Amino acid sequence: MILIDANVFMYAAGKDHPHKEPSIAFLDRAARDEIEAAVDAEVLQEILHRYRAMGRWADGRNVFRLARRSVPLTLPITADVLDRAADLLDRHDSLSARDALHAAVALEADAEAICSFDHHFDSVPGLRRIQP
């Protein structure tokens, strides 16, 4: 299983950018079940938060629908995940709290990889990052 970060959905739905087409292709493969994929609850919250904060709620609602439709498996944020995220933050100064949470979900779920454009995940032992 591959955990997909929010930035993949946002690039897929966004303006022209070098990451747009690879993101669309990756999400299309996930939607067709060619890739076993998941998101975590924080990825969905991040989409809601970001678009609402930008004053682009209609776009955010569409990106949220895209995420839910293309990747229906949503992993929970549990107390064990939060504990692991805190441990990651103790050891990795470069990680944001949000990235530590995504990394902890991936590690707790024994995910094969995390799909993201965020290079901060590269510093987490036991976690492989792939780009679409």
Image: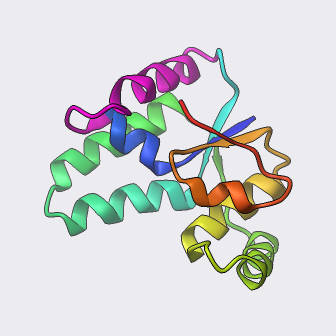
Q: Is the magenta region chiefly helix, strand or loop?
A: helix
The colour scheme used here is rainbow
Query: What span is colored magenta in the figure?
Result: 13-33
Residue at x 42%, y 61% (from the top left corner): 46
- Is 40 in the magenta? no
14 is higher (above) or lower (below) than 79: above
Position of residue 114 in the picture relative to residue 98 (left or right): right
Q: In which quarter of the image is residue 62?
A: top left
Residue at x 57%, y 35% (from the top left corner): 131
**Residue 60 percent coordinates (x, y):** 26, 50
**Residue 41 percent coordinates (x, y):** 57, 58
8 is higher (above) or lower (below) than 51: above
Position of residue 115 in the picture relative to residue 90 (left or right): left
Residue at x 51%, y 55% (from the top left corner): 43
- Is 27 in the magenta? yes
Q: Looking at this view, is 69 or 125 the one in front?
A: 125
105 is higher (above) or lower (below) than 39: below
Q: Looking at this view, is 8 or 68 the one in front?
A: 8
**Residue 83 percent coordinates (x, y):** 79, 79
Position of residue 14 in the picture relative to residue 108 (left or right): left
Position of residue 125 in the picture relative to residue 64 (left or right): right
Q: Looking at this view, is 95 or 97 the one in front?
A: 95
The quadrant the N terminus occupies is: top right
